[in-house]
Image (spheres, rainbow, N blue to C red):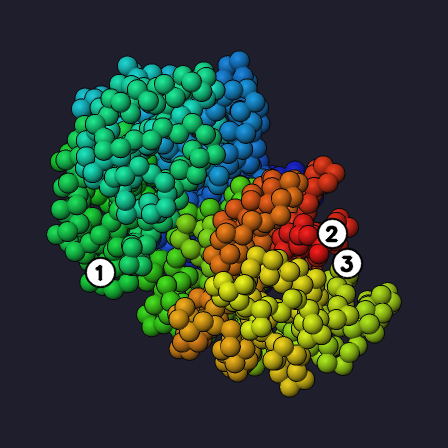
Amino acid sequence: MKETDLGQPERRAKSEPKRKPEPKPKPKPKPESEREREREPEPQLRRELYAALAGAVRGEVAFDATARALNTMDASNYRRVPLGVVAPRDADDVAAALSVCAGLGVPVVARGGGTSIAGQATGTGVVLDFTRHMNRVESLDAETRTAVVQPGVVLDRLQEAAAPHGLRFGPDPSTHGRCTLGGMIGNNSCGSHSVAWGTTADSVRELSVLTARGDRLRPGPGWAGAPDGLRALVEGELKTLRTGFPALPRRISGYALDALLPERGADVARLLCGSEGTLGILTEAVVRLVEAPRARALAVLAYADESAAAEAAAGLLPHGPLTVEGMAADLVPPDAGLPRGGAWLFVETGGDTAAQARARAEAIARAADVTESLVVTDPATQRTLWRIREDASGTATRMPDGTEAWPGWEDCAVPPARLGAYLRDFRNLLTSHGLRGAPYGHFGDGCIHVRIDFDLLTPAGVGRFRAFSEELAELVVSHGGSLSGEHGDGQARAELLPKMYGAQVVGLFERVKDLWDPDGLLNPGTLVRPHRLDENLRFAVLPREPVDVEFGYPADGGDFAAAVRRCVGVAKCRTATAGGSSVMCPSFRVTGEEEHSTRGRARLLHEMLAGEVITDGWRSTEVRDALDLCLSCKGCRTDCPVGVDMATYKAEFLHHHYEGRRRPAAHYAMGWLPLWLRLVDRTRTARLVNFLASVRSLASLAKRLGGIAPEREIPRVAGETFSRWWARGGGTRTGSAGQLDAGGPPRPTVVLWPDTFTEHLSPSVGKAAVRVLEAAGLNVTPVTAGGRPSSRDPGVCCGLTYVSTGQLDRARTVMRRTLDLMDRLVDPLLDPLLDPASASGPPPVVVLEPSCAAALRTDLPELLPDDPRARRLAAAVVTFAEALERHAPHWTPPRLDRPVVGQTHCHQHAVLGDAADRRLREAAGLTGTLAGGCCGLAGNFGFEKGHYDVSTACAEEQLLPAVREAPDGTVILADGFSCRTQLHQTSRTRAHHLAEVLAEGLPTS
């Protein structure tokens, strides 16, 4: 059986009973290192294991290269290649998988959202993925304030179920939109509200757990669910348990054995919290809910620096805040709107009313010794500010100069009263090692997050990583702290637990592990008998020298591997809803599959470069198939906290994948769209083309030959292009003859870019834009051949369709030709129009199609990094709204006073920004908020065969519901041709470009 066959097993009927495995004698435990050596994955073992699991488990069993590659890493610095992945349907499936693995001596790792930062969600055996099936809130009892959940349920789904009852789950990590309850229990996660509601362990009542040998236990208080021998072991070590564990709110490191003390209720469930899947596999949990405040307020307190903020945090706790979060200026955007300072505390308060919550926040602000403060009660503004804090786990991965920074010492915790002193010592230690980091985190609990610019690519850098880690562990312990205050030990810190606990307590951890898991099958190398902190580093497998690529990757030093390394696994792309105006990642929200998330695709590209699991390099079918459903929406470029740009990576990959080979038909049909449309224009055959497209049999044949989805309609070509309209006298021509208005100053000149879509498919947009721009007092000069279409000049083109299909050589040729054409056509046109006294640079180039503007802003200079004309043109590009705001600031648009719905183009959101558009709509009285997400058509994507269902599902997420629910008289806005086409073809709705809407409101005379 080939490896590629291992992900396509024959499924047995669901009703077929599973045979109970014969009980096996319990062997004597072996040293962990010996057990690991015996489990080296062999092809024969993998085949045998796959066959056994496929026959025993009703859920999916995948041992193919894609499944393995997607699970080599979590959000840590570590990488381990699993044998395969199992997605169990229920507890019986988990038991069956454990039985097979135990019989073959194969390790098992439980995995939820894969956002663990210490490496505990990776392993070399079988990964159990609980997110596919075991992902439900099974019940919720508002009276007892409890819920029964499966391990794969995402925290936000539990919060949504609890919210109608005025309840919530207390702990809330910043990854709440994708982390799972199983992962939170495994790591004993906390989040920003732990000063009020504690850690996950404080919110767990009872667990359902399977041991590696198949025992079903129900851990809880009073020794419930304890394995044989645990109570006797604990009762023989009471003195050690009472004296060997530091008392602080964020002690996550090691096993919580002190929870088994009789005075603490001998709570076995609490012991399991933070055990990182090393003792048992969770299949269900009963969790406690808390009452959610009816109203909240946020006090933002500014301090001179982070040490001042840290020293102030503990003094705020007596006021009963819900959160006391800290951030320094190096992680805060300059336009964040925070009060003046070098560091800030975000202190949230709650109340039964908004006035009560505000009063509490104001009382804290008055009591705090701050440079400035701000109290925010508006929920939307609070969400905006909290987003800065939540994104810090990603933004912290880049230093201000672009240097990479990594986790590893992500979340040490000290007593809150010692936090200021600890931070000063921590900064000194960084400096002594020549390292940099930006601390932030849960100041009220004494827990600090930080990403540090370790060099994990060279032996010397890795050596410094180890030396720093050892010294930092000693520093944390000297302050009475815990090596982990939230994310667990994993591989990152477990090796150093003896510095915190001493040999006796660590030996006790090992004895407890052997009671629960005598065969050492559950997440070996984690917590006890650990892997070294400097082995299994995920960077070690990447090529040392940059690979040859087409794009410039200026933010990554031209190194494609560095660009791929941007993905650190925080998985913001795995959220189930787009949220507000965000876009990323539409294909994941439709399919729910990891390989269709930005992170999943980045993982496959990482493994492609590594060459161990994905072995075909640029020819990889695994990477190609995962990228196939990438819409190239560019949403990740902005929404991903670390700026992963999967649209660019996809174009790069497609270029190399098809280099020297025949491409899919759609690449020629739609990738060469500008060429075909220019041919139609030159031959004056638009009417004929439209007629042929209206004949069903001919249209079907054309779509089949062109790789176009049969469900799609072929858009109509305009009978007259924008350039021909202009050549026959379109516009008022306020050029050299009409530039001066009654002796007034020269009219500012803007160059209008006739993109392919405006030129050939929707020239009405260009006509409307000319009318509005001229009404605003601007002189409009389209980029046409001396004002006339020319049979010799092919016209300007941004190269977008060639880029999106990965035809980068051709894209570069088109771009260079465009730059030459701009030199030849634009400068002579502008010479008589520009005032020499005021002309300090090239005029603004107004691009009406957002995707084309984005291509000119980003793809053009990145594909032609050595051509200074590319950078000049990119800098000159403005959107329609930006042109009006910057160059006609005193113009007042027509007052329309109508509601609007629609969608901000995903490329505009990601690259261009829509602030100017929002202000323009407000000035025109166009009220309402445009939807986020992606329309799903996304240029060629939605037209390609096989993409129709995903394309329309993306539109159904936000856009189509918003349009259907809009009241009569609502304006449907969509600046992108793709967005307008999607609306027309899926809902028979006609949408308009903002220029068209404003033009309709202008006086007719």
CB contact under 8 Å: marks 1 and 2 = no
Place of residue 701 in the rendered image (x, y in percent of width and height, measured from the top left): 81, 70
Task: Point out the tag, 2 or 3, that comes first from the N-terminus.
Answer: 3
Q: Secondary structure at mark 3?
A: loop
Work out how far the residue at label 2 is from the one at label 3, CA to CA, in angstroms: 19 Å
Query: Which residue is the site of mark 1?
Result: 461
Residue 213 drawn above or below residue 7: above
Q: CA distance from mark 1 to mark 3?
A: 55 Å
Image quadrant in which you'd find residue 543: bottom left
Q: Residue at x 46, y 17 (%)?
A: 353
The residue that disc 2 covers is: 990
Tell me where residue 294 appears, x and y as whole percent.
Answer: 47, 20
- Numbered tag placed on residue 254 in the rendering: none
Give the foreground label among 2 and 3.
Answer: 2
Kind of residue sitting beneath label 1: Gly
Three-letter amino acid code at the position of disc 2: Arg
Few, some or many residues within 10 Å of mark 2 (<14, 14–19, 20+) = some
C-alpha span from label 1 to label 2: 58 Å
Q: Residue at x 45, y 16 (%)?
A: 352
Q: Residue 764: x, y in percent?
A: 70, 62
Q: Quadrant of residue 741?
A: bottom right
Tell me the element at label 1.
helix
Q: Secondary structure at mark 2?
A: loop
Report the side of 221 relative to 157 (left or right): left
- Residue at the extreme bottom: 792
**Residue linked to disc 3:** 711
Q: Is residue 727 left or right of residue 388?
A: right
User: Which residue type carries mark 3?
Assistant: Glu
Q: Residues within 10 Å of mark 3 (few under 14, many from 20)?
A: some
The N terminus - image quarter: bottom right
